[in-house]
Amino acid sequence: MSTKNKKTFDVTRFTGLLASLIAIVCGLLIAFIILMLTDSSKGVDAFLTIITGGFGLGGFKNLGTLLFFATPILCTGVAMCLAFQAGVFNIGGPGQYSIGAFAAIVTSLYFSKDLPAPLSWLVPVLAAMVAGALWALIPGILKAYFNVNIVISTVMFNYIEMYYILRWISLTCYDALKGQTRPVPANCKLPQLFMPALTKNNASDIGILIAIVAAIIVWIILQKTQLGYELKACGKNPDATQYAGIKAKRTILISILMSGALCGLGGALYHLSWSGAYIPFRLQNAAEGFTGIAVACLANNNPMAAIFGATFLAYLTVGGNYMQIFGFQREIVSVITSIIIYFSAFSLFMRHGIERALLRGKKKDADETGEESV
Amino acid sequence: MEQLYFVSRYFMFFFIPLLVVATSAMFSERSGIIHMALEAVMVWSCMWGVLALQWLDGVVTGQSRLILALLFAGVMGIILTLLLGIASINLNANQTIVAQALNTFSPAFCIFFARVLQRGSEHLAIRNDFMINKIPILADIPVIGEMFFTKIYITNFIGIAIFIISAIVINKTRFGLRLCACGENPQAAESLGVNVQKYRYAALIIAGFIGGMGGLMYILPVSTTFSQTVNGYGFLAMSVLIFGQWRFKSLIGAAAFFALCMTISNSYSGIPFLASLGFPEAFYKSLPFMLTLLALVFISKNDKAPKASGQPYDKGRR
């Protein structure tokens, strides 16, 4: 009996993974069709470059780049996992991410560069998390106490951020020559430790490790603590949790604050890196915030699985950066990402379908064995 | 006086598309599908509309070029909205996530496509010769004539017509009332012989067509290029619908309020009083979004959204 239970448990796990894989395959397939329709002579080469992550062109050095791209989207992805599990559709990732990045840069330029070693980069990272959380605070309050649609309020905050951040950058840390933020002082960048040796890339640092630790911590919170239980219960049915004595409003607020802090963390880790990332002086929403949604969808809202989701999407991004060679645009990666989100959205439907098919097969087996034993 | 005319013209540029796009969302939400992908539909069909304008340039002249492009934008809008429909009607997907997928897809694809077409630049040029300088007779009415009947676009009248027809269709016809039933209590509607799925598809097709036209209507008067973004306008239209509490009558006031915000935000430098206040540009640019939040605070506590909106339809549920 016990083995049978274990088997069905494995089946559901397996179907979740299968659903994500189907979503990925569909995304890649449609991207391939788009590439072929645009330019059939280079479509195949371009597509192969995307799915080999550019390793063919850039060699082993790309592992460092891959981890560099994976770091911010792992943070935003974990942020979305947490928010979605709590039933809070935080679409404000881009805003919270950019505000965090800005806070980290300003703190390092004006304050923490005079501090001793671990503090010089820890303080900007913490400042970014606080800033990200604060940027999520108002939509959180509006949702919890005024029932304002969270998607709309977070999107509004993305646009407010988009306009205001340019002003704030130009007031504090604008490099007019390059049209971007000023570089972060070297002693405020993240420690590199053994990472350059490991990835054979001089620009690698421990950003990805911090992001993975964050993912593990969030996983532990969601799986093993009372807070996590309350968050998930709230996501399933806020009214019922209210009856059960869980303060739904407080839970919504906590989940979006944590989500905002994680987005801010992503912004800090990306912009305090040795690879040299700057906030461009352009009116735009940071793509990393939206990619976080795709990561969460691929991971089925599981922070541990988000590590793989983020790595995979970063892998595609590395390849996407070579698209210009073939006369294509790297936006094709965003197209793939969005198609993956689209197909993941009905992964529940797919999973039910797969499970039903599998169980039907199993029932047949069971019937046959049953007949034999009779 | 010149000032008033200037502001009122700007006001109409924002008011009409807001009204149209909010109407599009009305169809969808009334049938029970929350339409968070308005932004995506606007960007996507606007790109196709602008491309149609370019293709038709020299082939057709005058207003018919605009009308053909509008129709084309509408048809493309249907295609994108049906993607939302298939996922949320047949596949019981989470409608917010699907909409977000489309909101990511649409600008990315449009930038990709425009850059491929033009070898590098995503800015599509619009040759705009559609402005009507004067409507005979009506333009001679003092003040109002100058405000609303000079230097206008034919889209103003199309937009108002769409709004009025939609209001009649939803509130007065059998089709419209059944549609509302699908959004309020689909199980009850089904028990009376209404095919909920069919009605929802019909609603989304209408919503896609209107929303697609709305995208082109928005970009045409205010810009000479299209850069694959509508600046959060779709979400503002969604807010108009919420602020108007899903009622056509209140929609006019709500759209007027948001259009006024947009007018201030876009034309403050031409209004000496506002320019002299000394607020930064960022303040005016983000004003519509801040005021939207404020408006939603007052209205959302007891909103009158269609009860089944956003929930996948489950025949077995009671």
Image: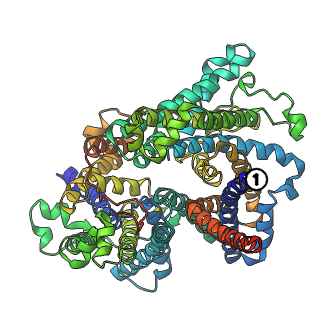
Q: Can the viewer see residue B120 in this picture?
A: yes
Which residue is disc 1 drawn over?
A315
Residue B135: horizontal and vertical position, in percent? 19, 73
Give the crowd class for mark 1: few <14, some 14-19, many >=20 residues within 10 Å: many
Q: Nearer the viewer, residue B240 or A312?
A: A312
Q: Nearer the viewer, residue A61 or B14?
A: A61
Residue at point 40%, 63% (across, down):
B219
Which quadrant holds residue B67? bottom left
The amino acid beneath tag 1 is: Tyr
- Report helix, strand or loop for mark 1: helix
* Apparent side of residue A195 relative to residue B98 in the rendered image (left or right): right
**Furthest residue to the front?**
A374
Compared with residue A262, is residue B253 higher up or lower down, i.e. above or below? below
Residue B119: horizontal and vertical position, in percent? 65, 67
Q: Can the viewer see residue B227 in this picture?
A: no
* Apparent side of residue A197 relative to residue A67 in the rendered image (left or right): right
Compared with residue A247, is residue B34 higher up or lower down, i.e. above or below? below
Q: Nearer the viewer, residue B309 or B50?
A: B309
Residue at point 34%, 32% (across, down):
B278
Residue A103: horizontal and vertical position, in percent? 57, 29
* Apparent side of residue B201 relative to residue A51 in the rendered image (left or right): left
